[in-house]
Amino acid sequence: MVLPLFDRSPSGIVFDAVGTLIEPDPSSTIAYRDAARRQGVELDVDLVRDRFYRALAADEVHPPHGPMTTDESFERIRWRRIVAFCLPEIPDLDRAFAELWEHFARPASWRVFHDVDPALRAIKQLGKTIWVGSNFDARLRGVVAGHPVLNEVLDSLVISSEIGFRKPHPGFYLNACRLMALDPGDVLFVGDDLVHDVEGPRRAGLRGGILIDRKRRATDQVTKALNLVELADRIRSRIDHD
Ligand SMILES: [Mg+2]
């Protein structure tokens, strides 16, 4: 059985960025491996990948103003710590951190998923307000500006380091709704992370959250769509039904 995505059509939709609209290309693991290689250190890709995901899972240790808070300077500290954890063998951590920080700030280091353009157009045509809500930092503004497909959302970004709360803190979602000038009950969240993009928005009182399950890993108990075009189709049929 396919679960209904929502009981009536929302006015606004917030899309997560990384893993939902864009992804690193090459992968983060390869970018980190290459940063080590430039310093003469050859690391196994699987080892770097394992460290990277363990570092991300444990990255909420000492935020400045309590759990799930952040700001721009803390994001630099956080990412420097992640680079240190992933590449302990390298002689010059400052250099690797600076290179990787710049790397992920460049639009060319990211690719936009193929379904983004048709889906955003279709949803826009349905009269929905579209925003992006991300735990990435201010670098996301430059990345979005560098991809014409995303120009639609250039002035509609909610970024955790700018508003002070990281997903899944309720303050993140409620600030997003405030910026959109919409009631939380009228806003749907969409993304590839169950905790950040589905459970967090629901707990904060939003209309709901939908998992974009590109790799078909989620159970049938989760409200999900396999890609953004399917999501757009289901929003359209919901509107037809309302
Ligand atoms: Mg994501």
Image (tube, rainbow, N blue to C red):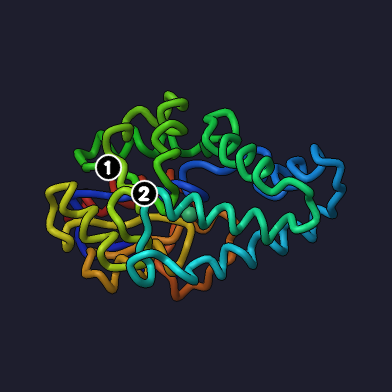
Asked if labels 2 and 1 touch by Cβ distance under 8 angstroms, the answer is: yes
- What SS does tag 1 mark? strand
- What SS does tag 2 mark? strand
**Residue 159 in view (yes/no):** yes
Question: Which residue shows up at 81% across the image and 41% down it?
Answer: 39
Q: Which mark is residue 155?
A: none
**Residue 9 in view (yes/no):** no
Q: With 97 as the anchor, is 133 left or right in this view?
A: left
Q: How many marks?
A: 2
Badge 1 density bin: few <14, some 14–19, many ≥20, Cα 10 Å: many
Badge 2 density bin: few <14, some 14–19, many ≥20, Cα 10 Å: many
Q: Is mark 2 within 8 Å of ligand 1?
A: no
Quarter of the image for the N terminus: give it.
bottom left
| Residue 149, horizontal then vertical, whole percent | 42, 28
Taking depth in this image into account, of 144 and 137 the one nearest to the observer is 137
- Residue 121 picture quarter: top left
Taking depth in this image into account, of 17 and 158 the one nearest to the observer is 158
Residue corresponding to mark 2: 15
Q: Which mark is residue 130?
A: 1
